[in-house]
């Protein structure tokens, strides 16, 4: 306990009105824990970077970080020197400390490019594949963290380190993280973890069917494709998936994300517009009525059950939707 009380993180300047405190987290070093109940959607932390290096992460050198450090006022230098690795040891070099405590933000100088800023407090939050907070996309240098569900006092506040983990299995996630996560989706051989791998794999496949590409924006080779049926894979890549199937796939993705406890307000805002666009694109009267009925159901599982009535049904709009998608993606029509 004495070591905990004297830990350098005790000297980090947490805002007086912040709903969290920093303290040891079992098997994770230190983390941020709620000091009071935090409602879903509430702001947890808004923070400016200590400094920004206007380079891609892979190009940042020890000299870059030391130069930025030298420009800091004395009190901020002391704050930076508080940083430790997960074993509570000082970092062996400053570029290592920067890499472990930085976030990508939009470049001031080059539109569309990302640079990295060092965030003392945001970097204290630990990872979970089923997090309870999220940092939505920002257009400025200040980043903000919000609760994605209600958080009770004493609960650790977590977020997901990678943006595509809802599409990756436990093994794939741990390879990318290079450490072992022990969240509910990662507790090996448990029913939830086994179902989680199945759900996330299915979501990835459904997105391939609707987008025609994988996570990296590329088509998968036939030898290792997540879509085993070559005709279905070809149809997906040629944007020939019928409107009824597209609607069912979109609703099923939302259903699976809800079951996986990942359908937070930000994810909903990101994905729901495309589902609504498809729902309103039907031109065959019966299909349009079923789609409208599906969208007014209370839960996503109920929406999916209704949407299944469209399975295999052609629509007058199928050809035009296919042509628009092919033109949008630069394919011949």
Image (cartoon, rainbow, N blue to C red):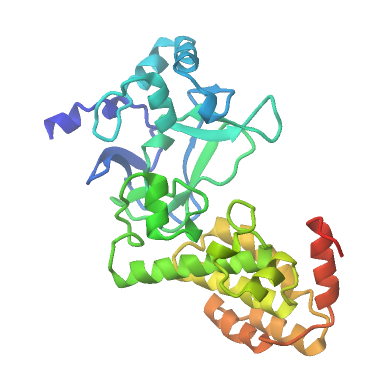
Residue 89 location, quadrant: top left
- Residue 266, compared with residue 51, is above or below; it is below
**Residue 62: where, in percent of width, then height?**
44, 17
Q: Position of residue 94 (x, y in %)?
A: 39, 20
Q: Is residue 207 above or below residue 73?
A: below
Measured as percent of width and height from the top left, residue 28 is found at: 27, 43
Extreme front residue here?
223
> Which residue appears at 19% of the width and 26% of the height?
6
Q: Residue at x 79, y 79 (%)?
A: 282
Count of residue discs: 0
In the image: residue 328, left or right of residue 189: right
In the image, residue 138 sits, relative to residue 73, either above or below, namely below
The quadrant of the rendering that contains the C terminus is bottom right
Rendering quarter of residue 300 = bottom right
In the image: residue 201, left or right of residue 15: right
State which quarter of the image contains the N terminus. Answer: top left
**From this viewpoint, is residue 125 visible?**
yes
How far from the left and from the top, in percent, is residue 18? Answer: 40, 39
Query: In the depicted view, which residue is nearer to us: 300 or 84?
Result: 84
Please tell me in which quadrant of the rendered image residue 241 appears: bottom right
- Foreground residue among 237 and 265: 237
């Amino acid at each position: 306990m004495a070591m905990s009380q004297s830990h350098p993180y005790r000297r980090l300047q947490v805002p007086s009105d912040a709903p969290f405190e920093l303290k040891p987290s079992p098997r994770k070093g230190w983390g941020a824990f709620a000091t009071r109940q935090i409602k879903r959607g509430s702001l947890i932390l808004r923070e400016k970077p200590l400094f920004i290096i206007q380079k891609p992460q892979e190009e940042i050198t020890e000299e870059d970080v030391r130069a930025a450090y030298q420009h800091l006022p004395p009190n901020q230098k002391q704050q930076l020197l508080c940083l430790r690795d997960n074993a509570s040891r000082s970092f062996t070099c400053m570029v290592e400390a920067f890499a472990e405590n930085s976030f990508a933000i939009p470049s001031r100088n080059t539109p569309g490019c990302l640079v990295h800023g060092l965030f003392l407090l945001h970097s204290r939050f630990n990872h979970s594949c089923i997090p309870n907070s999220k940092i939505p996309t920002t257009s400025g240098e200040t980043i903000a963290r919000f609760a994605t569900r209600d958080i009770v006092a004493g609960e650790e506040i977590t977020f997901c380190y990678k943006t595509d983990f809802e599409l990756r299995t436990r093994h794939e996630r741990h390879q990318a993280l290079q450490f072992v996560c022990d969240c509910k989706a990662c507790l090996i051989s448990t029913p939830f973890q086994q179902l989680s791998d199945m759900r996330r794999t299915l979501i990835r496949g459904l997105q391939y069917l609707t987008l025609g590409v994988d996570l990296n924006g590329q088509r998968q080779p036939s030898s290792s494709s997540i879509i085993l049926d070559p005709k279905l894979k070809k149809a997906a890549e040629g944007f020939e998936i019928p409107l009824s199937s597209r609607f069912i796939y979109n609703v099923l993705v939302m259903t699976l994300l809800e079951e996986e406890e990942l359908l937070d307000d930000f994810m909903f805002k990101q994905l729901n517009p495309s589902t609504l666009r498809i729902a309103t694109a039907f031109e065959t009267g019966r299909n349009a009525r079923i789609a409208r009925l599906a969208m007014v159901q209370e839960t996503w599982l109920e929406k999916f059950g209704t949407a299944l009535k469209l399975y295999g049904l052609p629509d007058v709009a199928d050809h035009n939707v296919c042509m628009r998608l092919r033109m949008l993606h630069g394919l011949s029509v």
